[in-house]
Amino acid sequence: MLELRLVQGSLLKKVLESIKDLVNDANFDCSATGFSLQAMDSSHVALVALLLRSEGFEHYRCDRNISMGMNLGNMSKMLKCAGNDDIITIKADDGSDTVTFMFESPTQDKIADFEMKLMDIDSEHLGIPEAEYQAIVRMPSAEFARICRDLSSIGDTVVISVTKEGVKFSTRGDIGTANIVLRQNTTVDKPEEATIIEMTEPVSLTFALRYMNSFTKATPLSSTVTISLSTELPVVVEYKIAEMGYIRFYLAPKIEEDEDEHETKPQV
Amino acid sequence: MGIKIVVGRAGTEMLTNEAGEVTSHLQGMFSRTIRLLEAGMKPVYVFDGKPPDLKKQELAKRYSKRVDATEDLAEAVEAGNKEDIEKFSKRTVKVTKQHNDDCKRLLRLMGVPVVEVYAVASEDMDSLTFGASKFLRHLMDPSSRKIPVMEFEVAKILEELNLSMDQFIDLCILSGCDYCESIRGIGGQTALKLIRQHGSIEDILENINKDRYQIPEDWPYQEARKLFKEPEVFTDEEQVELKWTPPDEEGLITFLVNENGFNSDRVTKAIEKIKAAKNKSSQGRLESFFKPVANTSAPIKRKESKCVLQSPKPAMKPRMFSVQACNSSRPKLTGGRSLPTLALGLKYSPQLSRGGCFAT
């Protein structure tokens, strides 16, 4: 038996909008800790990890750990039928092959039940170890979305370099090049407008802009975004979800084919 | 990869150079390799070295088939049956040492590494029994045929068929492999049934109806099994050095245009393509950074999965994936067992040489 009541139903709507284009089908895992999801895109280049902690729900009942396979496109279709102020309740019975989304209007005068078929999904779960990142950039999420959108009109890839001076986003394409530098800036009126850079070592990594642009669909969830970078690790682009959790996107870097590098780098 | 699969031709006509020597194999090899490079892959071509003794039987069979086909072809040409001409002429294709050497020379000029080994992973399923954990089919089909690449994963197959690796090897031997004959009347279906029922070839031989199924007198299934389980592989010391280098432009033009009559414009354009592809950085994949773990939560409802060969829902779920997505980068490999997988197009990636980090 599973019953999760989320007063701020719009959060779930936004979560779905941010991941449905990246991942087609995914298993939602329910446990005492919370409602979570981990899924990779079909080419295994990007991964999304979602957590909505149980404390964030008004009512959270999950008798045993279960996973529910859903088609995210279909789930999004159903959630689009919920109003932005609606309270959303997710319900599933043991042994059932459907899940029910119940939408209640704030005034309780309209109640809608949408039942969706579950799917059997074989998915690989990756263990993501806690890591110390060499550079962590926190910046306004709208600014990050703007940069990714602008750069993708010039090139396919973005080089993100973090140095003492700031964070640089650059690209190169057939028509020319583009460089955008953001400096650390903490003297703003509102804390969410700050750009904060924590760095232990300079980092420079290349990523496909196509994926970055897809991640920025989560911008409505949070006014800030945190980008964590380390050489040898996928980048993490994290959006906090109110007080109750996060959505993290992991993206494997592009590997620069530098002939000299092969010569000098010893193979272990 | 044997070049048997890259000889591009139609009907009985072969592409030839001025001296009348066949060049179809070069054309096919050239264009398809460029396609792989453009998709960001790093191909390694593996050529047959000395075949294992067991394979000689199969090779002899192929030879006699070719002789048959040559006769059939002559008939078909006389009768003017187009379909038959196509069918039989395909079977008469014989790869000579000259063809192999041509291809090797071409590949070296293109900067693609060439390895010679004694057993290779190929278009057939044998590679799975050799312990390659993944196997791609249709990777080298001409793009014009638009056939999606199929991926087979041995762990999934075993799980779906509910067999152990040993049983899977026996199943493959029974259904017919390159290394020994199969029993007349036993195909994939019967073989699977027998393995399920009896567990191993030994037990099957004890229980089987000998009148119905004729077991070949000299049936070296044990040797075949040993070959699958303990193939001769490269050890760490004799590691194969794989290196992708920039193409040798002049060499390619001399070889293809001057010696083999290729159109020089097309070759120049193709060289540009190779160079562009080599400069492209390749996309890493998450499995090279994070290891798969078991998921702790149980599905809310697990449908009973039942599996038979040729069930309506295919037992081995072929997964389609775009060629763009496959990549690899470090040009070196360690250990021998991974060789068959690598020969198939190096799907995995940077951590390969650093060892350890990915269980496919």
Image (tube, coloured by chain):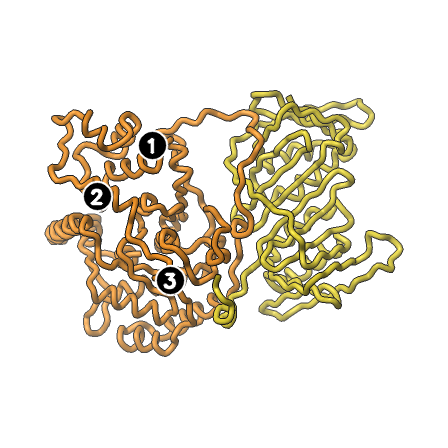
Chain colours: A yellow, B orange
Name the residue nearer the viewer: B236 or B316. Answer: B236
For the N terminus of chain A, the quadrant is top right
Q: Chain of mark 1?
A: B
Residue name at image x 35 percent, y 29 percent: B308
The circle drawn on residue B230 is: none
Is residue B78 shown to the viewer in this render? no
Pointer 2: what residue?
B223
Name the residue furthest front.
Answer: B237
Are callouts 2 and 1 both on one chain?
Answer: yes
Pointer 1: what residue?
B310
First in sequence, mark 3 or 1: give its number.
3
**Residue type at the position of mark 1:** Gln
Please tell me in which quadrant of the rendered image residue B247 appears: bottom left
Q: Residues within 10 Å of mark 3 (few under 14, many from 20)?
A: many
**Residue type at the position of mark 3:** Thr
Please tell me in which quadrant of the rendered image residue B48 appears: bottom left
Q: Chain of mark 2?
A: B
The secondary element bearing badge 1 is classed as loop
Residue name at image x 40 percent, y 26 percent: B306
Number of the front mark, 2 or 3: 2
The circle drawn on residue B33 is: 3
Q: Chain of mark 3?
A: B
Q: Are marks 2 and 3 in contact (CB under 8 Å)?
A: no
The secondary element bearing badge 3 is classed as helix
B347 sits left or right of B56 in the view: right
Percent x, y of residue B161: 37, 32
- Alpha-carbon distance for marks 2 and 3? 35 Å
Residue name at image x 65 percent, y 32 percent: A78
